[in-house]
Amino acid sequence: MVIKFNVDKIKQRYKVESTIPLINDVSSLTKPKNNSLIFCLEYKEEFEKSLLKIKESIVLVNKNANIPEKIANSNVVIYVNNPRMEYAFILNNFIDEKKITFPQESYYIDISSRVDSSCCIEPYVFIGQDVTIGKNCHIKSGVKIYNNVTIGENCVFGCNTVIGDIGFGIERINDGHWERIPFDGVPMKIPHFGGVTIGNNVEIGALNTIVSGVIDPTVIEDNVKIDDHVHIAHNCKIRNGAAITGSVVLSGGVEIGQNSWIGGNSIIFQKKERSKSKESKDKSKESKD
């Protein structure tokens, strides 16, 4: 795969005075390549042997790194505070990508929905009723977006993710009082009409489920990044800049704060509350004692 970097933008951002080589690939310190982008968090002498074999690459290193002149003469070495972050920044901002379009008959968009023409919609995508999707979103193959979902700009949705389907709120048909977790009677699911609201610059991985709110929407704010295999239940609120890693489960009504980090396989339950019927039974038992 050939990657087309915009070397003029790289030169401008990092104030490089020398000529920037034309790079078309990425590579690691253990297997460096010519004409590639490489980052080094902590330079070690053991890297010297492999880096001496390449030329015309861009090497991002931390500011206190001592790079031998013979390596610097054959490549462009850029000193930064955080090489890994700058590597990611270049890949996100300084690659010239040709927009790929797919035939309209390969996906379905309901006539009531509004999807900006700048979006990339891959085959086998389903977009239901009253959905709004802003500019420059990428919706990958197999994604299902159900009714009453609003999505901002510059968002990415991974393969086979489902957004806005009904969640698991239930009641049981009985003569008793409300209980948070009812056990008596035939279970009856509660329809969800709140939809989902997603902000700008949100990235959601593959095989996720983002459930519709019951009455008000489930909300994912700007700049949220979500890994694969994540379940977000009804009426959750994910605040600006939060990062959620793989296989996380958020039960209904959970709120994740701004710039939070949720580790893999975490399960966060909604607030626990004793039911009124349980409290009355306990009080009755205490009075008898």
Image (cartoon, grey):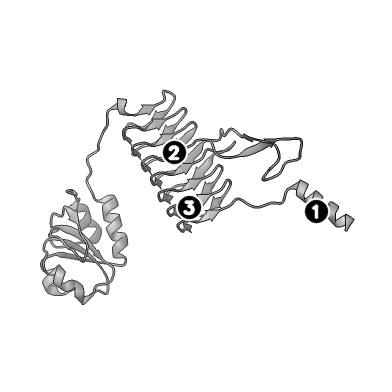
Q: Mark 3 and mark 2: span between their CA atoms?
A: 15 Å
The quarter of the rendered structure image containing the C terminus is bottom right
Mark 1: give few (<14), some (14-19) or many (20+) Cα within 10 Å: few
The residue shown at (29%, 60%) is: 86
* Label 1 vs 2, first from the N-terminus: 2
Element on which disc 3 rests? loop
Q: Which mark is residue 248?
A: 3
The residue shown at (28%, 64%) is: 83
Q: Which mark is residue 9?
A: none
Q: Mark 1 and mark 2: span between their CA atoms?
A: 42 Å
User: Is there CB contact under 8 Å for labels 3 and 2?
Assistant: no
Q: Mark 3 and mark 1: span between their CA atoms?
A: 35 Å
Mark 2: give few (<14), some (14-19) or many (20+) Cα within 10 Å: many
User: In the rendered image, which residue does mark 1 sit on?
Assistant: 282
Q: Is 116 on the left or on the right of 32, as rendered?
A: right
Q: Is 124 on the left or on the right of 242, as rendered?
A: left
Give the residue type that dot 3 points to.
Val
Q: Nearer the viewer, residue 124 or 146?
A: 124
Give the residue type that dot 1 points to.
Asp
Q: Nearer the viewer, residue 229 or 61?
A: 229
* Label 3 vs 2, first from the N-terminus: 2
User: In the rendered image, which residue does mark 2 sit on?
Assistant: 162
Mark 1 or mark 2: which is in front?
A: 1
Element on which disc 1 rests? helix
Give the residue type that dot 2 points to.
Val
Q: Nearer the viewer, residue 121 or 159?
A: 159
* Label 3 vs 1, first from the N-terminus: 3
Q: Is 235 drawn above or below residue 78 in the view shown? A: above
Q: Residue furthest top?
A: 111
